[in-house]
Each structure stands twice: as C-alpha cells, then as structure tokens.
Amino acid sequence: MTDNIFAHEHPESERARGGGFTLWFTGLSGSGKTTIAHLVGPALDERGHVVEYLDGDTIRTHLSKGLGFSKEDRDTNIERIGWVASRIVRHGGTAITAAISPYVETRQKARDLVEQFGPFVEVYVNASVEECARRDTNGLYAKAYAGEIKGFTGVDDPYEAPESPEIVVDTEAQTPEESAQIVVQKLEELGFVGSEVRA
Ligand SMILES: Nc1ncnc2c1ncn2[C@@H]1O[C@H](COP(=O)(O)OP(=O)(O)O)[C@@H](O)[C@H]1O
Ligand SMILES: [Mg+2]
C-alpha cells in the first residue's frame, strides 16, 4: 500500500537544535513507568528542559488508536513513538516515553531513529511479574490470568529485558521517589541535564 507514497524528508531542516534527548522507560505493565516518568518530568522542567510525555496508554488513545497487541501492532506503536520522540529531540526537546516496549529489536529501531538527533537513554523499570500482578493497578493481570485477556505481556506474551540499558531502577526495592532520583542523578552524570534548578 506504500507503493504510491513518496516521502519527502526535508533534509534542509534536518539540523538538530541540540540539548534534547529521549528518556525511554521500558518494563512490564505495572512496573512503574508512568509513575516514575511523572516524577522525573517536573525535575527536568525545573532544569530548563521542554518535556513531552509519550505514554503508551495515551498514545494508544490518539496516535495509535485502533492498534491492538499483536507483535505487528506493538511494533508499529513503538516505531511511531520512536519517530515522534526523534522529532521532539530534533527540536531540542526532551521526550519521556513510557510504553512496555517488550521487544529488544523494536527498542533498537526507536533508538536508531532518535540517535540521528540526540541521545537515547533507556531506563529498565524492573519489577517481577509476580509483584506487578500483586499490584495489579488496573486489574489487567487478574483478567489475563483468568484468560479474559490474551497475549498479555509477562503472562502469555514475551517481555525481553534490556541487556545494557543506560539506567536500571528496581521498583520492588525502591520507592517511586528513590527511583526518580536515580534517573535524574544518572542524567546529570551523563551530562544531559544540569544540576542547577531554576528559581
Ligand atoms: N519504585 C517505584 N516506582 C514506580 N512505581 C512504584 C514503585 N514502587 C511502587 N510503585 C507502584 O507501582 C505502580 C506502578 O504503576 P504504573 O506507574 O501505572 O506502571 P506502568 O506505567 O509501568 O504500567 C504504582 O501503583 C506505584 O505506586
Ligand atoms: Mg503506564
């Protein structure tokens, strides 16, 4: 269906503004991606970054409305998020993504898109499936274990943990505030974020 589409890439405006980066949270449903993203975002805002959130559930109600949870649809969703994140970074913004993004290969595709314009920082939000199911923030694990939802990540669909993420947080051992602090500190160490908070 793409045979008759001639994408024009506008190379004349490909120059990145600089200063932007993508903070890519990955982890099981209920591991804490959204919670930590919304603690880190304001901290970056205070340090002068223009922050945009690309949260999986929000993206699925807008940009990816109608997509399901087959491998193909999941990959399409993640590639869309990666592409939008790359555009935000090109303009010097900070994209904070929070989608399960279960496949290594697809996260790499998102990384490749973003790294054309700026850094990609992968944050592995680690919590066991048992703990996520115990939290069951949205009641989805109960439905998945009852067979009412098929292809649920961590129950009957794969989750491929990152092998060398820039940051790992352990949300079984840390509070959300501690996890967020680890992320911000690491961003400072990497030199992507200044430590000075605006008045
Ligand atoms: N260190 C932590 N970081 C983030 N969330 C945590 C942590 N410890 C406990 N939680 C709890 O885990 C749940 C995570 O839910 P949510 O952020 O919606 O997950 P996700 O976006 O990954 O699906 C929340 O109820 C949160 O309070
Ligand atoms: Mg979430």
Image: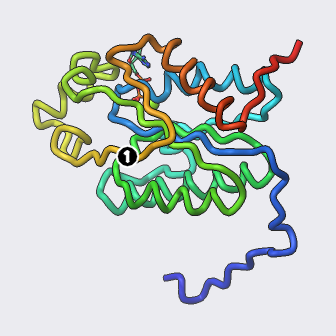
Task: Identify the residue at horizontal 37%, vertical 23% (top origin).
Answer: 170
Q: Quadrant of residue 31?
A: top left
Amino acid type of the residue tagged 1 in the rendering: Pro
Question: In the image, residue 90 lies at what x, y percent?
Answer: 76, 55
Q: Is residue 25 left or right of residue 121?
A: left
**Residue 35 in sight:** yes
Query: In what element is the residue under mark 1?
Result: loop
Q: Which residue is mark 1?
A: 162
Quadrant the C terminus occupies? top right
Task: Identify the residue at horizontal 32%, vertical 51% (top origin).
Answer: 69
**Relative height, residue 136 to residue 82 (above, below):** above
**Relative height, residue 23 to residue 178 (above, below):** below
**Residue 57 in sight:** no
Q: Residues within 10 Å of mark 1 (few under 14, many from 20)?
A: some
Question: In the image, residue 177 lies at what x, y percent?
Answer: 53, 12
Q: Quadrant of residue 187?
A: top right
Q: Quadrant of residue 159?
A: top left
Residue located farthest toward the front when viewing the structure as drawn: 189
Question: Could you say which is closer to the camera, residue 132 or residue 169?
Answer: 169
Task: Identify the residue at horizontal 41%, vertical 13% (top origin).
Answer: 174
Question: In the image, residue 66 lies at what x, y percent?
Answer: 43, 53
Task: Identify the residue at horizontal 41%, vertical 46% (top origin).
Answer: 164
Question: Could you say which is closer to the camera, residue 153 or residue 5?
Answer: 153
